[in-house]
Image: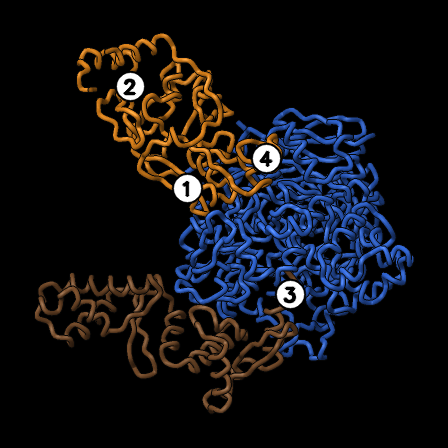
């Protein structure tokens, strides 16, 4: 292919620029970007070649790039220089389903740190849910068998926290919530 | 040219009794003790006899800084102040306080690594140090004034760049719960009364000299940049407090609070912090906003900027501008401090009408800072406020204080959470007016004794956080299990050690912490997830030893133990590793005295050993395990009676803690039964003379 | 216009002062007329935002440690310490309008303006020790020529001259080969390195200059400026 290296450089820049502003980019959008610049046409390329071959090449050659797929297999791309894998996961979950997002964020926190997370934190970026949305999601989760592990605890300051019982037992979650909400500030 | 860089070269000695001023050669006399607390403990050991009391003229007070003070090494603006401690109960022992600000650097530029104050002036004086010219000057006009006026008047005489450390009315009145303050808001707890007892109102320093960097300047620049690149936010928290695009990890209680949309609202015009990626070293100062951290989102609109010590990019103090307080309380709109100093006013009140993070709480903080930092009152890491609440709630005030005096306080204001109450309480504490204020000013130990309250009541109480000898815990089992407990047994005041808690609170996932722990202390088992503690092992003892030694090292080098050590970093490209040798790298290059990490840690161990020896000598017992290294009962109690090592409790087990002390003493090379260093250990660190002295007194195991 | 000056005057000036004679019209914004530029204008300038200064003094430390191998804020070529506590007016102005840590928090960073001709510090120096550096045309002290008389300090309206406490010689901001250390060191991004512009009419002076130009040098001024 004539201008393969240049097109690859373009694709790389498109992905990295998007990551710099805190966003993922899907294959279709990459193609649209290229089309806007008139590239596939001028090279006489078809969509498949662009996406399959060139994109694959760019991913292989640049270790900072990652591919992440949602539950339907739709792929997104980002550079970990500006956009971490954790952040990418949150963005993907957000695009799918707020219930799924809440549950996965709660599970990841309960498993990894480990710690419960406050309901209020789900209102902040990048989650961006409203209080009503959170309440609705929690109601829905209570009846959905996929979310039976998601549990709540309340601190002495009245703050509600969520945790996954798959990874944290209730006493541990309760104490950690109290420690995070009240304890650490009382022990500066 | 002096053989070594770093050190200024002279320690100043001022005898206030005979008004003699002399100097000593720092390197000749104190090189093996570095500076800071090292010089402090050495002077107290050599020159202050056991049985001396804190306010005796024979007590000495040592202002010590280290070879790194005044340089561009990040976080070096600390002065350690060592003396016999007025609030240490029942018997005063050696301890140190620490103040930030600009005093340490200015002292170095004036040509001094420390000031030893001894004796007592026959009338109020202040000490003027202008480069090589040192004078004892008349302070009768300053006596009775607050710290603020004292400082401004001295600056008018010495010029605006002089750094002034002054006591307020509390120190003058020999209130044990008193401080010395420099640079507006940087206090060292516990020592105000010692200065007051010597009739020393203030020390003003002006230095126009320099601190030489022995090493190659390009190498120094590279090292400084390495250190800067490893910095997190305050307390070396290395992840942001919410998910940011740049970070893999985050922690809602991280002190790294910067993000898009948050701004210094009272800057003119306001300045957005933005996300502050760790690679951007020109945005380190925006990562931390402790006013917002402790007082809530509302504090952002009142934030003018960050503030802090010389050479520190973190700016852990927040300068707040709250216009309402000037009309409501008649105090300046602007106040600044951090942590417990910031919260001084809020901590007294059980509640506020608009909650702990509302407007009233902020106003209480502003009033508290304004009063406490001028009167010069100490909070003993918040114990003053906790005691106050408990004594009020239990009805002890109304029982121990005469009715007329008790009714003289506006308790309705107190119950309503009205900050005006502080105007009644704090000046009385500083001036020892009345039984209530006098008792509070003594410190917890002497207060309990005066009012016939058994210490046991405090030792059982989970909420008071009291540990021993009149002081509270400072990051113990709730932060770091057995390691935290060990650390809290070792000092004669609250431990003031953050080496361990900076690590356990850094916000990284437990698996990452365990990986780093393996590299630093030998095994992932050195750390547990909070409230999922496992039984004691050798690695936790190693971590405790490391924590203590690094704290002494920082206090002697002049590095900030509220920031260091720097063994974790925010950098994914380093797998979140920091650099465990950063202290020795900085020391070696600045002084030209090349020491490896292990070698410098050994110097720290010598300093820590001297503290231990002093404590043993002045307690008159070698049985430290039973008499000194005690642990309050509440550590072994769980409110829900969960067993130790169950998930969801921070309760420790008595036998396990006995093992913890065994392993710690073994790690230190101390006698297992008594917890006393052995002759061999003293010898290993060149402290034969210390061992000999203790042998004479029958205090060697 | 300036192009009317003859070669012989140029040669004369080169002989006496060794200063670069550049004849051009002034492009400086705000200049009232087109001055003859004896010293080439600096190409860069360090400027600072006082609302962002957090009072850490890392700029002063970087300036002296990385250039001189010692930490010496007294000698720093960017000046913070003197405004840090109370602002430029010091603790004598009453506390109402105070700046600095004891006032409203504002810390003014004092910086060398890399003055266009006539350069006060250079003109005041009896030894012509302040010269134009080939790097960024910054105005720099030649330590071999400096005798530490401090006339330059008297001349600078912003009191920007520094003196090395170990040698007593003058030093001043020389823009660090186009990569100023202070800019790099600032943790709040308060300091920037920008294209040169004339701030001599914008920034209020800190003191009243009291230096005089030597008769020899005054003659060259007269020669150049004679119609």
- Give the alpha-carbon distance from disc 4 to disc 2, as whole Å: 40 Å
- Give the alpha-carbon distance from disc 1 to disc 4, as whole Å: 24 Å
Q: Looking at the colours in the rendered structure, which chain would you say is drawn in brown?
A: A
Q: Nearer the viewer, mark 4 or mark 3?
A: 3
Location of mark 2 (residue): C19
Please state which of residues B526 and A79 is positioned toward the viewer in this rendering. A79
Percent x, y of residue B467: 75, 62
Q: Nearer the viewer, mark 4 or mark 2?
A: 2
Check disc 2 and report its element: helix, strand or loop: loop
For mark 2, name the chain.
Answer: C
- Relative to A171, is C12 on the left or the right? left
Q: Is residue B592 above or below residue B2?
A: below
Disc 4 and disc 3 in contact, CB within 8 angstroms: no
Kindly identify which numbered label has been placed on residue B354.
Answer: 3
Kindly identify the residue that appears in the image at 70 percent across and 68 percent down.
Answer: B659
Within-10-Å neighbours for mark 1: few <14, some 14–19, many 20+: many
Disc 3 and disc 1 in contact, CB within 8 angstroms: no
Location of mark 4 (residue): B106
Disc 1 and disc 4 in contact, CB within 8 angstroms: no
- Give the alpha-carbon distance from disc 4 to disc 3, as whole Å: 43 Å
Q: Are marks 2 and 3 on the same chain?
A: no
Location of mark 1 (residue): C191
Q: Looking at the colours in the rendered structure, which chain would you say is drawn in blue?
A: B
Please state which of residues B362 and B314 is positioned toward the viewer in this rendering. B362
Q: Nearer the viewer, mark 1 or mark 4?
A: 1
Within-10-Å neighbours for mark 3: few <14, some 14–19, many 20+: few
């Amino acid at each position: 292919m004539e201008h393969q290296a240049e097109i690859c450089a373009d694709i790389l820049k498109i992905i990295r620029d998007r990551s710099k502003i805190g966003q993922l980019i899907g294959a279709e959008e990459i193609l649209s970007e290229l089309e806007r610049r008139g590239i596939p046409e001028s090279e006489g390329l078809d969509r498949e070649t662009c996406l399959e071959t060139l994109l694959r090449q760019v991913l292989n050659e640049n270790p900072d790039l990652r591919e992440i797929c949602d539950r339907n297999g739709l792929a997104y791309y980002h550079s970990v220089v500006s956009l971490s894998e954790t952040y990418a996961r949150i963005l993907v979950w957000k695009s799918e389903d707020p219930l799924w997002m809440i549950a996965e964020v709660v599970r990841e926190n309960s498993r990894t740190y480990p710690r419960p997370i406050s309901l209020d934190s789900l209102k902040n970026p990048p989650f961006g849910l409203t209080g009503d949305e959170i309440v609705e999601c929690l109601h829905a989760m209570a009846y959905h068998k996929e979310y039976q592990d998601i549990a709540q605890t309340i601190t002495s300051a009245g703050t509600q926290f969520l945790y996954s019982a798959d990874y944290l037992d209730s006493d541990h979650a309760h104490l950690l919530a109290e420690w995070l909400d009240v304890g650490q500030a009382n022990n500066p | 040219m002096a053989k070594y860089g770093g050190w200024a070269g002279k320690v100043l000695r001022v005898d206030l009794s005979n008004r003699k001023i002399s100097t000593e050669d720092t390197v000749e006399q104190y090189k093996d003790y570095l500076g800071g607390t090292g010089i402090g403990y050495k002077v107290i050991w050599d020159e202050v006899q056991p049985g001396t009391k804190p306010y005796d003229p024979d007590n000495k007070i040592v202002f010590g800084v280290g070879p790194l003070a005044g340089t561009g090494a990040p976080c070096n603006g600390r002065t350690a102040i060592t003396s016999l401690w007025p609030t240490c109960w029942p018997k005063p022992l050696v301890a140190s306080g620490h103040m930030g600000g600009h005093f340490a650097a200015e002292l170095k530029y004036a040509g001094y690594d420390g000031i030893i104050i001894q004796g007592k002036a026959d009338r109020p004086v202040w000490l003027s140090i202008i480069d090589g010219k040192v004078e004892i000057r008349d302070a009768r006009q300053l006596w009775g004034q607050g710290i603020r006026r004292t400082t401004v008047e001295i600056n008018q005489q010495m010029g605006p760049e002089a750094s002034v450390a002054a006591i307020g009315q509390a120190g003058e009145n020999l209130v044990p719960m008193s401080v010395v303050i420099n640079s507006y808001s940087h206090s060292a707890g516990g020592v105000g009364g010692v200065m007051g007892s010597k009739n020393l109102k203030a020390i003003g320093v002006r230095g126009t000299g320099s601190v030489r960097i022995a090493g190659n300047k390009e190498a120094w620049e590279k090292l400084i940049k390495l250190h800067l690149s490893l910095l997190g936010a305050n307390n070396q928290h290395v992840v942001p407090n919410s998910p940011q695009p740049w970070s893999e990890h985050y922690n809602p209680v991280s002190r790294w609070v910067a993000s898009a949309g948050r701004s210094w609202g009272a800057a003119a015009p306001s300045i957005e912090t933005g996300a502050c990626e760790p690679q951007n070293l020109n945005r380190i100062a925006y990562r931390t906003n402790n006013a917002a951290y402790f007082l809530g989102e509302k504090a952002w609109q009142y934030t003018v900027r960050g503030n802090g010590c010389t050479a520190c990019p973190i700016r852990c103090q927040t300068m707040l501008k709250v216009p309402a307080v000037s009309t409501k309380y008649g105090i300046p709109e602007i106040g600044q401090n951090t942590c417990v100093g910031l919260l001084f006013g809020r901590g007294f009140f059980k509640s506020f009408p608009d909650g702990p993070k509302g407007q009233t709480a902020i106003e209480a903080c502003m009033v508290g800072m304004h009063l406490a930092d001028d009167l010069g009152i100490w909070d003993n890491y918040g114990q003053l406020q906790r005691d106050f609440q408990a004594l009020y709630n239990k009805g002890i005030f109304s029982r121990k204080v005469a009715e007329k005096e008790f009714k003289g306080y506006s308790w309705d204001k107190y119950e309503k959470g009205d900050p005006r109450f502080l105007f009644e309480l704090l000046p009385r504490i500083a001036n020892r007016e009345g039984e209530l204020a006098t008792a509070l000013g003594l410190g917890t130990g002497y207060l309990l004794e005066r009012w016939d309250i058994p210490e046991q009541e405090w030792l059982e109480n989970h909420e008071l956080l009291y540990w021993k000898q009149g002081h509270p815990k400072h990051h113990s089992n709730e932060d770091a299990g057995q390691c935290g407990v060990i650390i809290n047994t070792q000092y004669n005041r609250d431990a003031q050690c953050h080496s361990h808690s900076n690590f356990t609170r850094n916000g990284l996932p437990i698996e990452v912490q365990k990986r780093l722990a393996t590299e630093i202390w030998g095994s992932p088992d050195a750390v547990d997830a909070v409230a999922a503690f496992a039984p004691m092992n050798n690695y936790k003892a190693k971590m405790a030893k490391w924590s203590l030694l690094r704290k002494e090292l920082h206090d002697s080098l002049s590095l900030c133990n509220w920031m260091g050590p720097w063994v974790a970093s925010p950098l994914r490209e380093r797998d979140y590793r920091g650099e465990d040798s950063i202290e020795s790298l900085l020391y070696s290059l600045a002084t030209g005295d090349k020491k490896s990490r292990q070698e410098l840690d050994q110097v720290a161990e010598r300093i820590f050993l001297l503290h231990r020896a002093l404590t043993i000598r002045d307690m008159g017992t070698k049985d430290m395990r039973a008499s000194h290294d005690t642990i309050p009962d509440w550590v072994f109690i769980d409110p829900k009676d969960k067993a130790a090592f169950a998930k969801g409790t921070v309760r420790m087990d008595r036998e396990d803690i006995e093992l913890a002390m065994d392993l710690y003493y073994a790690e230190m090379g101390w006698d297992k039964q008594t917890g006393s260093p052995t002759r061999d250990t003293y010898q290993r660190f060149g402290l034969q003379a210390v061992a000999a002295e203790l042998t004479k007194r029958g205090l060697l195991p | 216009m300036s192009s009317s000056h003859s070669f012989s005057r140029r040669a004369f000036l080169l002989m006496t002062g060794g200063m670069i004679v550049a004849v051009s019209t002034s492009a400086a914004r705000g200049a009232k007329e087109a001055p003859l530029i004896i010293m080439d204008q600096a190409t860069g300038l360090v400027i600072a935002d006082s609302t962002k200064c957090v009072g850490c003094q890392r700029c002063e430390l970087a300036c002296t440690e990385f250039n001189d191998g010692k930490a010496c804020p007294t000698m720093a070529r960017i000046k913070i310490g003197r405004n840090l506590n109370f602002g430029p007016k010091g603790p004598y102005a009453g506390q109402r309008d105070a700046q600095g840590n004891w006032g409203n928090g504002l810390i003014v960073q004092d910086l060398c303006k890399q003055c266009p001709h006539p350069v006060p510090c250079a003109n005041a120096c009896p030894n012509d020790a302040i010269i134009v550096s080939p790097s960024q045309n910054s105005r720099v002290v030649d330590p071999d020529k400096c005798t530490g008389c401090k006339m330059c300090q008297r001349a600078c309206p912003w009191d920007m001259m520094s003196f090395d406490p170990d040698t007593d010689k003058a030093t001043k901001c020389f823009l660090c080969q186009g990569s100023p250390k202070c800019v790099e060191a600032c943790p709040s991004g308060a300091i920037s390195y920008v294209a040169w512009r004339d701030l001599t009419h914008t920034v209020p002076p800190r003191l009243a200059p009291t230096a005089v130009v030597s008769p020899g040098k005054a003659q060259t001024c007269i020669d150049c400026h004679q119609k």
